[in-house]
Image: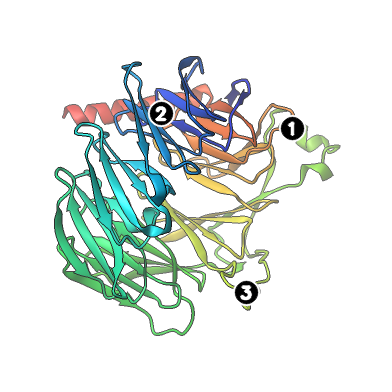
Amino acid sequence: MDFTELYKQTSNLCIFSPNGLYIAIAVQHRLVIRDAESLQIIQLFSCIDNIQSIEWSQDSEYILCASFKLGVIQVWSLSDQEWTAKINEGVVGLTRVQWAPDGRHIISFSDFKIRISIWSLITKEVIYIQYPKFNSTKGFKFRSDGKYLAVAGRKDCKDFINIYECNEWSLLKHFVVEDTDLQEILWSPDGKYIAVINNSLDYNVCVYYPDGRLVKSYTTDKIGLGVKSANWSPSAQLLAVGDYEQNVTLLNNYTWDPLIKFSHDPVIEDSSVIINKEIDVSNIRNNLDFKWNLQSNKIRYEMINPPYELVTTPVDLSKPNPKIGISMCLFNNTGIYLLTKNDNMPNYLWIWNIATLKLVTIIEQLLPIKQVSWNPVIPGRLAFITGNSNIYFWDAEMGYCECVDVPALNFEVHSMNWNPDGKSIVLMDKDKFCLAFPIEEEMEEIENIENIETMEDDN
């Protein structure tokens, strides 16, 4: 990969615009807009305090920054330098802010879950949603087409879901959910269903139609902790449910019965599974067999054939929120691969093939894995980091892992974000960042995918 020079940033706030043309960077109280390829400065804005959040509108026309400490939101336009807006939440405070899908409404979340405010940039009016259960995205989800909004609330010791239409922000439907303690709502990508996840004490997943009708309630009779994570496949045909028992259950949208259960056993016996084990190069730097790899800046991986035993971390069940269970279920953009992560195996990633319903690869790292992200364009391209000076990749076609060392002194990758066009990735240290660009072969693959999508649109 090719890397740019290092630039300053604060709070790991380096956000690509949805169209992939720009990247916004927070540098204390300054908001810097740069070109996503050349990193030339396009715009420079000054905020009233240190920036704690950055959000782009969906059309990349507007950008906002927020100071939670002051409860202030500032908005700018990239096309009209004279236009600006400022929102002051006052005594109710500010904990989170985001754009509505139309890019002309701003949604702010107050302290203590008092209310959700919807601010219009066109009419300058504000609409309030009372009794939200969360001030996070767990209970606040837009449908994929942006026409409807689902909000989880709680009143009189009962959890409910409100459905709003996003033109006039009027309430269309109100229904109480069966769950005793709703923890998350997930709107399916096709907009037909809303999955409701109960608290970790009960294994309970309820699926509703947006009009409030219950489609299916999936529970188990086992005694123990329940659901820890869940995610829809891009086609909405499958709902992956990860639990504290270190299993992932796939529910199909035809019968809503389990299609298969993926277990995360510490002993791997299936000979078809490829295990990519990272090698500690500090012990082999004098070995001539690895000299070519060291010169190419690629971390060596050992391909291990099962049977193989994975290393697990001891769990103290006497403490709250034990580090055990499936905390991550991520489908790639085509839904062919499912990535899972088991918290008491923090150094491992599991990759499953949904077409064959089999485990494909296990990735073993020397350090615990901090962040994982699929390439938004290339279906089988995965990036992940462990907090050291390297960025790691797994490629489905090649079937193996590689790691590229960031060519900068004392640079540790704490966070990363793909450009929506899949052509670059931003890597962030504590106070610096750089962009990484794929090599020519990878660029050709992205262009081929774009050409295929263009031909399909034309047809």
- Please state if 331 lies on the left or on the right of 288 as rendered: left
Q: Position of residue 67 (x, y in %)?
A: 47, 39
Residue at horizontal 35%, vertical 63%?
133
Residue carrying label 1: 410
Marks 3,2: beta carbons within 8 A = no
Query: Residue lying furthest right in this view?
Result: 286
Q: Position of residue 389 (x, y in %)?
A: 69, 37
Residue carrying label 2: 446
* Front-most of residues 87 and 300: 87
Q: Position of residue 50 (x, y in %)?
A: 54, 34
Marks 3,1: beta carbons within 8 A = no
Marks 1,2: beta carbons within 8 A = no
Residue at horizontal 36%, vertical 42%?
98
Of circles 1 and 2, the one toward us is 1
- Please state if 135 lies on the left or on the right of 412 as rendered: left
**Which callout, 3 or 2, points at the residue further toward the start of the chain?**
3
**Which callout, 3 or 1, points at the residue further toward the start of the chain?**
3
The CA span between labels 3 and 2 is 46 Å
Residue carrying label 3: 319
Classify mark 2: residues with Cα within 10 Å, few (<14), some (14-19) or many (20+).
some
- Amino acid bearing label 2: Ile
Residue at horizontal 24%, vertical 63%?
161
